[in-house]
Amino acid sequence: MRCPFCGNVDTQVKDSRPAEDNVAIRRRRFCPACGGRFTTYERVQLRDLVVVKSSGRRENFDRTKLERSIRIAMQKRPIDPERIDQMISGIVRRLESMGDTDIPSKVIGEIVMETLARIDTVAYVRFASVYKNFQAADDFDKFVSELRPGLVEE
């Protein structure tokens, strides 16, 4: 593994342990050339996924991009970071087990929204506001009112 600080290709593993509910291995590494320490994660990848955008454009699936969007939605929410990692791993496993390597971005968005709805409604609404491209406050009102269909307005 190349050192991110000096580029040395001969780094040493100092510690390995299971991570993300035993679906990844966390490795602490040390670079003998510059003394830098860094962490890497090793995960099983069943297949290379391709995201098919609504415009028809295709791009390789990027777990980091998925993770970033979920973490933004979960920002300042009382959810354990380990729980977020487990959720992301679960979404990726679900995508990989769908049987097809081409996955429409709409399917990914729906799976993320479904998962967020079970974990945190505020994060769900945050993600939905970007995913569904809310343009005005009325869009939020309408979406939230659909979350609580039993509520009667006075």
Image: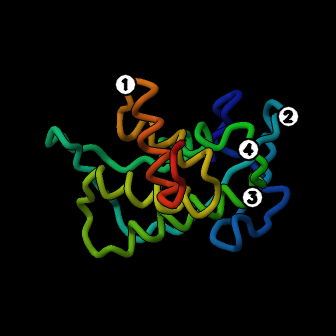
Disc 2 target residue:
35
**Crowd band around label 4 with a 10 angstrom C-alpha radius: few (<14), some (14–19), many (20+):** few
**Crowd band around label 1 with a 10 angstrom C-alpha radius: few (<14), some (14–19), many (20+):** few
The mark tally for this picture is 4
Say which amino acid is labelled 1. Gln
**Residue 136 in the image: above or below residue 13:** above
Label 2 sits on a secondary structure element that is loop
Say which amino acid is labelled 4. Arg
From the viewer's side, name the closer residue of 154 and 63. Answer: 154
Say which amino acid is labelled 2. Gly
Name the residue at the left extreme: 56
The label on residue 82 is 3
**Crowd band around label 2 with a 10 angstrom C-alpha radius: few (<14), some (14–19), many (20+):** few
From the viewer's side, name the closer residue of 7 and 48. Answer: 48
Disc 4 target residue:
77
Label 4 sits on a secondary structure element that is loop
Sequence-first disc among 1 and 3: 3
Label 3 sits on a secondary structure element that is helix
Residue 146 position, x and y percent, is 44, 52
Quadrant of res 84: bottom right
Give how far apart the Cα atoms at labels 4 and 1 are.
24 Å
Sequence-first disc among 3 and 4: 4
**Residue 107 in the image: above or below residue 9:** below
Can you tell which of label 4 and label 1 is closer to the viewer?
A: 1
Say which amino acid is labelled 3. Glu
Sequence-first disc among 1 and 2: 2
Can you tell which of label 2 and label 4 is closer to the viewer?
A: 4
Disc 1 target residue:
135
Can you tell which of label 1 and label 2 is closer to the viewer?
A: 1
Sequence-first disc among 4 and 1: 4
